[in-house]
Image: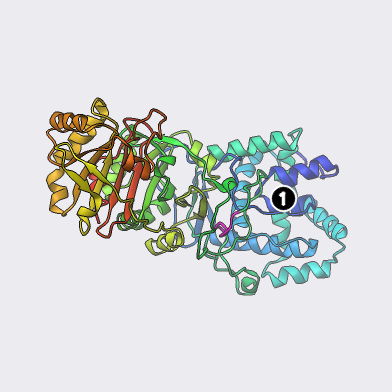
Amino acid sequence: MQTRPCTDKRRIKSARIVTGLLLLAGLTACGGAVPPSAPMRTTTPALSPTAQTSAEPVGSDIVASVDGEPVSRLDWQRALALDRAMSALAGQPAPGIEDALQRLVNERLVLRLARQEGVSATVDQAEARLLALLARWGASEAQLDAALTGAGLTRAQAVEAIRRLLMVEAYLARFDSSESASRWLAEQRRQARVGIYVDLAAQPQPPPLLAAALPATPLVLMPATPTAIPSSPTPPSSTPSIPTAPPQAPPPDNAAPDFILPDVNGQAISLSQFRGQVVVLNIWASWCPSCRAETQDVAEFARQYRRQGVTVLGVNLREDAATVRAFAEANGIDYPLLLDSQGAVAAQYQVVGIPTTVIVDAAGSVRGRHVGVLTQAQLAEYVAAWLPARAPAPAFTLPRENGQSVSLADYRGRPVVLLFYRSAGCGSCQQQLAGLQAVYQRFQARQAEVLAIAVQSVAQAGVTQQLGHLAFPVLADDQHQASAAFGVYNRLGDGLAAPAVFVVDREGNIAWSYFGQSASDYPSPEAILEQIP
């Protein structure tokens, strides 16, 4: 199949926009402008693995793989150098580090299919396109040679890159619109098994002559004051470093997309149930070497920070529960692992390779995005600015089941678990209370007290105590004094307290909380025990 020049506006738009991250395809093959960048998108399908396979070949010289085909560090360096040299000649903004890597990923996807169908391009065609571009840009061959030499590249390398991109252009020319080609490319990306084996918040080691051209700031962090998330299929190219303080009121258009996924035991878990905590979404798969490399750091971070109001959720891509459960047991993972069997959450969060980690603050806004391996220290740095301040627990005095008055202040100097259950007649509540009673001695061993509270009379509190043979106090909040103060009264719209748990530290501050989304949505006793400071 012969290549055809990109002569009309529709074709130019297609090659520039449809290829998305193929920036050089837009700039070099068709002479279009590099589109503006965006920090994150929520509309384009994402990359995700589709099968369980053995580990990809990975080493210091491999930065990514596409269905087992490696992308080398040298490939990445050269692509970045060429992108920037050609951008300078065209008078366009230089693309970012992640742009160059994602362009190579897309190029691998399209070229594989193009070659299968006999699409080809010659060196002469690539030379002719290069000369046409220079004429369009008003640049001379001497300027080209100087730009390439400054980037540590040869003209032959530039021509070969253009030859490949002519093949991409020819293959994509079959689509009648940029929209249909966009959908096709997004589907190819969704089905591909892509691994990112490099920290994209760090910089690749460039050839010496390229070093001065690299930006000094990380490229994949969200800005401290996020803007609206655009729908344009455009990748990030530069973003400020980690913010030092949250804004007073995060705009709602940066809200983290909510989702519900089953964990390895089949229990439905939603992102919104962790509102009030910082959530670290770690999107991974067991076949990914870099995901395995960061496992111990993520697990240790989760253990150390859960008492500071941070929850790690591992979102596994397209693997079955048995595989994920076995991996967790072998690696000592004790944070929730959710099954994204269709890649839907990865699509919501614009995953372009794994591992990808997204930081969501206590208000539910996206605050950071990191592609590649993370260390425990890096995770701590990401969440430092968004750790929730411990607010004082509202004071209350309530009668317990035996008629004696109990005040929260009575327990100052001891951790207190406040369990807001719904009523004496609630079956799931009785199960929750029985579960806590079964481990009550372990709470006492940590000098912690459990106070069960419901919007009911003293008589009903007595019934609850008798039904569960409960040794800890059961309080009557029939005037919803405490449940209203803690924000759990009538949350489910039925005049009762929603199932909720608060851990109050020795100083009387709220150290941890859990708000149920239904009558049967409550944390396990083990999960509560882990939060006792």
Res. 271 visible in picture: no
Judged left or right of residue 422, residue 351 is right
Judged left or right of residue 152, residue 459 is left
Q: Residue at position x 65%, y 46% from top?
A: 230
Q: How crowded is mark 1: few (under 14 residues within 10 Å), some or many (20 or more)?
A: many
Residue 202, x across and y down, in percent: 52, 64
Q: Which of 151 and 190 is in front in this view?
A: 190
Judged left or right of residue 323, residue 252 is right
Q: Nearer the viewer, residue 488 or 8?
A: 488
Q: Nearer the viewer, residue 156 or 195?
A: 195
Q: Residue at position x 40%, y 50% from top?
A: 277
Mark 1: amino acid? Ala
Q: What is the chief secondary structure element of the magenta stretch?
A: loop
| Residue 203 vertical position relative to residue 291 in the rendered view, above or below | below
Residue 311, x across and y down, in percent: 37, 50
- Residue at image mark 1: 25
Q: In which quarter of the image is the C terminus?
A: bottom left
Magenta segment: 220-226
Is 192 within the magenta? Answer: no
Q: How many marks?
A: 1
SS of the residue at dot 1? helix
Judged left or right of residue 398, residue 311 is right
Res. 409 visible in picture: yes
Q: In which quarter of the image is the N terminus?
A: top right
Q: Residue at position x 74%, y 47% from top?
A: 16
Residue 192, x across and y down, in percent: 53, 40
| Residue 94 vertical position relative to residue 529 in the rendered view, above or below | below
Residue 157, x across and y down, in percent: 69, 61
Q: Residue at position x 23%, y 50% from top?
A: 416
